[in-house]
Image (cartoon, rainbow, N blue to C red):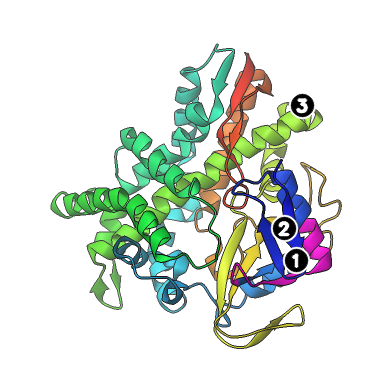
Amino acid sequence: MTVVVTTSRGTGFADQTAQLPEVLDWFRHMREADPVSWDEHYGAYHVFRYADIEKVLSDPVTFSSDLTGLIPKQEEIELFSRGNFVRMDPPKHTKMRRLVSKAFTPRVVAELAPRIAGITNRLLDDVAGQGEFDLVQALAYPLPVTVIAELIGVPADDRDRFRRWADGLLDAQVPDTVIPDEKMMQQAGARFRDMIDYLLAHIRDRRAHPADDLTNALIQAEVDGEKLTDEEIVGFLGVLLIAGHITTTTLLTNTVLCLDEHPLAAAALRGDPGRIPAALEEVLRYRSPFPRLARLTTTDTTVAQRLVPAGKVLMLWLASGNRDGAQFVEPDAFHIDRSPNPHLSFGHGIHFCIGAPLARLEGRIAMEILLRRTTDLRVADGVQTYDPRIMTGAKYLPLRTLWT
């Protein structure tokens, strides 16, 4: 078993693996002992309490999302960053995000519901009757990646390629320091190269052969009277393609894991599917897909009465904030009807996840159909999960199944 070593200044891990219960224990200890903790070796302040995380995310002037000035130069990463609005500050972030938001309005997302249901049923048809199947391969991955691929206009049949890119990012070694060295940057750039080449080829094809999709909309869009370059569009599409499916994939696997651990909750949702949306919000809180976000101080400031100098990185542990007893009653209990449930799993403030409505819709429809088409789901042996310091979710989730 991996031992988590906690100190008054931060944390170190005994090796390069960690399990979720150990990480949650670390969060619990640090919220009480040192909620804004300077980690000399890691080179960042760890922030663990809900109120402090919310404060940081609410102030993009003091706490910047742009850490590119700290990172060693690397060609592929620099190219990808040109259109990565997740790492931008206002006013550029505001302008770039506005372009993509048109593809995720409530009306546009709602219109996807029949397509999402159709894909879900088709995918389950392929495994119906099987006593055991992998939820990730059968449904949790292909459903959201097919939807986002169709929005972007790339072939959904390339989804095995997309998964290699995502797994390459998620399976990367947990860095020993918050700012990667040149070797790690070269390794990261190599993981991005194939995706960048693929998306550039797609963008250039769209310029020659316009179609009714988001890529074409970005090609036609203007920011301050200027069209986006191919390189800027690459960053847009890369974020949407990877982040646009990972959240739903992990939401579905985490939901099934939670229901397996809480069979009364599973029975309640089978009996009343109208409770599924609230249950999904509780899954997002209880097993937060993206456990952390980073911010950079632009000036001397204080967080939880602790002075933080300008130019320092804050590692905001969303997964810890979501288990903070000062914000949530019985934070370590799983309550499918929890209300209110202001979890931080989609972020907060100007960078609140733009794809949250789509992830929620995909999760609701997929779970409604999965529970309707089965009478029993049990997690089998052999589950494989990501490192919970990078991503909370399963990459392989075998289920023993009874079908209706």
Q: In this view, does 96 lie to the left or right of 253?
A: left
Relative height, residue 47 to residue 147 (above, below): below
Relative height, residue 156 to residue 24 (above, below): above
Of tags 3 and 1, the one toward the viewer is 1
Residue located 64% across and 72% down the image: 40
Asked whether 227 or 18 is in front, the reply is 18
Magenta segment: does it hold 206?
Answer: no
Which numbered circle lies on residue 49?
1
Q: Position of residue 328 (x, y in %)?
A: 81, 57
Assign a secondary structure to mark 3. helix
Q: Can residue 341 be seen in this view?
A: no
Q: Is residue 86 visible?
A: yes
Contact between labelled residues 2 and 1, with CB atoms less than 8 Å apart: yes
Q: Which amino acid does label 3 sit on?
A: Ala
Assign a secondary structure to mark 2. helix
Contact between labelled residues 1 and 3, with CB atoms less than 8 Å apart: no
Q: Mark 2 points at which residue?
A: 320
Q: What is the CA distance from the residue labelled 3 to the residue labelled 2? A: 29 Å
Contact between labelled residues 2 and 3, with CB atoms less than 8 Å apart: no
Asked whether 363 or 244 is in front, the reply is 244
Q: Which amino acid does label 2 sit on?
A: Ser
Mark 2 Cα-neighbour bin, 10 Å: few <14, some 14–19, many ≥20: many
Which numbered circle lies on residue 287?
none
User: Considering only order in the chain, which callout, 2 or 1, is on the residue closer to the N terminus?
Assistant: 1
Q: Is residue 236 left or right of residue 280?
A: left
The magenta segment is 27-43
Q: Mark 3 points at which residue?
A: 267
Q: Quadrant of residue 250?
A: top right
Q: What is the CA distance from the residue labelled 1 to the residue labelled 2? A: 7 Å
Report how many numbered discs are placed on residues in the image. 3
Q: In this view, does 254 lie to the left or right of 221?
A: right
